[in-house]
Image: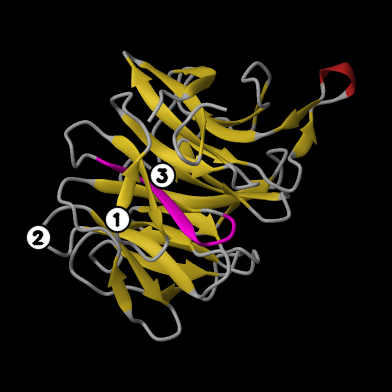
């Protein structure tokens, strides 16, 4: 297990919603204009303007385009499979709501409107629905809805904290994090056709931020099972896991769109740095 290489540096990024970084597939999107245009590779939440807003960023971390302005703590963005739409979370001080906008920040529409906390939104692989967590139940449970905010369907009904939903890329399965067994945060998966639930981790500590690889055969996640949060990988169905990082304070891993690399975040003081590694934790 070797130390991962640093990819880029983000100063003052927010940890809001399901992740701090969303990797944009579909070849990204060209933003800006003329000589200032660049290929967007990541969606990030940053407080570089004084409060948290969403930005598109290139792969080097040197070019940004601010997408949101004037919201209270925006984050938790998810990009649609066609790369044209972003679902994001914006705080309403007493709670948080879900919004959508075009990839360039235009056409903002509010999707939820209730006094509870809605967050952790992710598009399904075909873009036909959006999954999210909400406390409207009144417990925190997993829900899905159409991308226009209609046809809300409750997926989990446990009185525990269920959050951070992630869709399986090829099967009717949603992975999520819950403290329903023993009070620790563990990763579970629910089949939305049968409602059968499988527990994927059982290590104690806090197991968070799951993400499937594009083939749906592997899962990366963060765990504090040895003390500080580190990144692990396992089969998508659970079982034994391999620790990938020993950086200390590593979290929010995501597979790249090709599935051959993993990006994760790490706190160094008050700064969040982003690191890239291959899928066995070694340097490329």
Q: Residues within 10 Å of mark 3 (few under 14, many from 20)?
A: many
Residue under label 2, please give it.
182
- Above or below 116: residue 255: above
Q: Nearer the viewer, residue 138 or 196?
A: 196
- Residue extending farthest to the top is 269
Residue under label 1, please give it.
240
Q: Earlier in the sequence, mark 2 or mark 1?
A: 2
Mark 3: which secondary structure?
A: loop
Q: Residues within 10 Å of mark 2 (few under 14, many from 20)?
A: few
The span shown in magenta is 214-223
Residue in the image at 72% along x and 38% along y:
104
- CA–CA distance between discs 1 and 3? 27 Å
- Left or right: 41 as drawn, with respect to 131: right
Residue in the image at 65% along x and 16% along y:
62
Prevailing secondary structure of the magenta residues: strand
Please tell me whether mark 2 or mark 1 is closer to you in this view.
1
- Residue extending farthest to the right is 34
Residue 253 on image: x %, y % = 44, 40
Question: Can the viewer see residue 102 in this picture?
Answer: yes
Q: Nearer the viewer, residue 216 or 29?
A: 216
Q: Nearer the viewer, residue 55 or 100?
A: 55
Residue 229 on image: x %, y % = 26, 34
């Amino acid at each position: 297990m070797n130390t991962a290489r640093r990819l880029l540096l983000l100063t003052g990024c927010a940890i809001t919603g399901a992740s701090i970084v969303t990797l944009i597939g579909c070849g990204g999107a060209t933003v800006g204009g003329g000589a200032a245009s660049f290929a967007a590779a990541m969606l990030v939440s940053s407080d570089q303007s004084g409060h948290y807003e969403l930005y598109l960023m290139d792969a080097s971390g040197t070019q940004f385009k601010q997408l949101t302005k004037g919201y209270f703590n925006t984050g938790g963005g998810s990009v649609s499979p066609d790369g044209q739409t972003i679902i994001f979370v914006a705080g309403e001080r007493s709670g948080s709501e879900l919004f959508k906008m075009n990839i360039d920040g235009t056409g903002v529409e509010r999707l939820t409107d209730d006094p509870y906390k809605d967050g952790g939104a992710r598009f399904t692989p075909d873009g036909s629905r959006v999954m999210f967590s909400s406390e409207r139940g009144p417990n925190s449970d997993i829900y899905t809805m159409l991308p226009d905010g209609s046809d809300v369907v409750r997926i989990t009904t446990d009185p525990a904290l269920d959050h951070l939903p992630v869709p399986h890329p090829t099967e009717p399965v949603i992975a999520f994090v819950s403290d329903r067994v023993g009070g620790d945060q563990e990763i579970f998966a629910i089949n939305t056709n049968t409602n059968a639930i499988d527990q994927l981790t059982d290590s104690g500590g806090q197991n968070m931020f799951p993400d499937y690889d594009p083939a749906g055969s592997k899962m990366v996640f963060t765990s504090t099972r040895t003390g500080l949060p580190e990144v692990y990988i396992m089969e998508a169905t659970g079982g034994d896991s391999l620790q990938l990082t020993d950086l200390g304070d590593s979290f929010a891993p995501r597979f790249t769109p090709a599935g051959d690399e993993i990006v994760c975040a790490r706190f160094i003081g008050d700064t969040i740095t982003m690191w890239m590694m291959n899928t066995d934790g070694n340097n490329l």
